[in-house]
Amino acid sequence: MAGLGLPRRWRMASAGQGLPYKSCAAPGMTFLTTNKISAIAPHMKIASIVLCGGESHRMGQPKAWLPIGPERMLQRVVRLVGTVCPEVVVVAAPGQDYPPLPGGITIVSDRDPGQGPLEGLAAGLSALSSSPEFAFVTATDTPFLHPAWILRLHELIGSHDVAIPNVDGRLHPLAALYRTTTATPAVASLRAQGQRRLLLLAETLRTREVTAEELRVADPELKTLRNLNSPEDYHQALREIQSPKLPE
């Protein structure tokens, strides 16, 4: 597939660029605002694991390096999850090139590359250093992610091990929250059985399926679930970059 006309290697000084986070709630809906996030987030023991080791065949370029506003895609996603997660782990493929990230970000490689997101989650969980109670898992191609989404899942998980979005009958394991004490051994067990499907984790553990309506409190248009898989997806995202509903 033809590339997007980007240089092979890009460099930026920081992932902390961009405008303050903002978004719009649907009429009559209470939205988790920046001030509410700032008040709640320090008390949450939530880490984030960002999987960026995919091969990006359809995109034709490494997704981590795609410019999104003043940042690269990976920088943006790391910054967004970092507003509510004090620890962020990035899981890359061995030898993968990625844009500069802020100090304090842990970067690890898949132990067995090419085996899918379950393998990436195993690497991410093993790299957590702060003993967080929960880990939010996302991919690198989610520039529309709302930080309030993470807090909403935390609010709803209760005594369950997984809080996973179920939208239009489809489960989204790469926009879900996992309890680390139960997910870590469950992932190890699945890997030992030769399993590779991340959704098996939700089938194994006590899982809270979260509906679209429950999630609209945090993300009225559910844009957190939006992945950029093709050049067309990417260019459409660039056209929307000035939208007031895009988290910055």
Image (cartoon, helix red, strand yellow):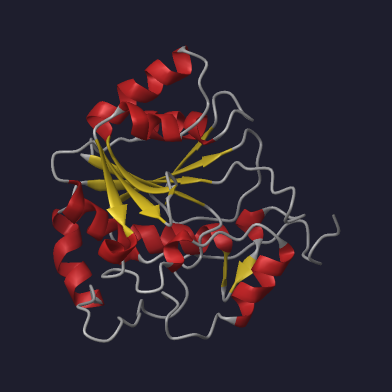
> In terms of image quadrants, where is residue 25?
bottom left
Q: Is residue 36 above or below residue 40?
A: below
The x, y position of residue 21, in whole percent, is 36, 76
The x, y position of residue 102, in whole percent, is 44, 57
Give the left or right position of residue 223, taking residue 45 as reference. right
Q: Is residue 219 above or below residue 193?
A: below
The x, y position of residue 99, in whole percent, is 59, 55
Give the left or right position of residue 18, taking residue 68 as reference. left
Visible residue check, residue 83: no
* Residue with the most extreme right position: 2
Of residues 100 and 189, the one drawn nearer to the viewer in this rendering: 189
The x, y position of residue 158, in whole percent, is 14, 45
Give the left or right position of residue 56, taking residue 1 as reference. left
Q: Is residue 33 above or below residue 141?
A: below
- The N terminus sits in image quarter: bottom right
* Residue at 61% in and 50% down: 98
> In terms of image quadrants, where is residue 248?
bottom left
* Residue at 27% in and 86% down: 27
Of residues 209 and 233, the one drawn nearer to the viewer in this rendering: 209
Q: Is residue 127 above or below residue 17?
A: above
> In terms of image quadrants, where is residue 64?
bottom right
Visible residue check, residue 57: yes
* Residue at 24% in and 33% down: 206
* Residue at 33% in and 35% down: 128
* Residue with the most extreme top position: 192
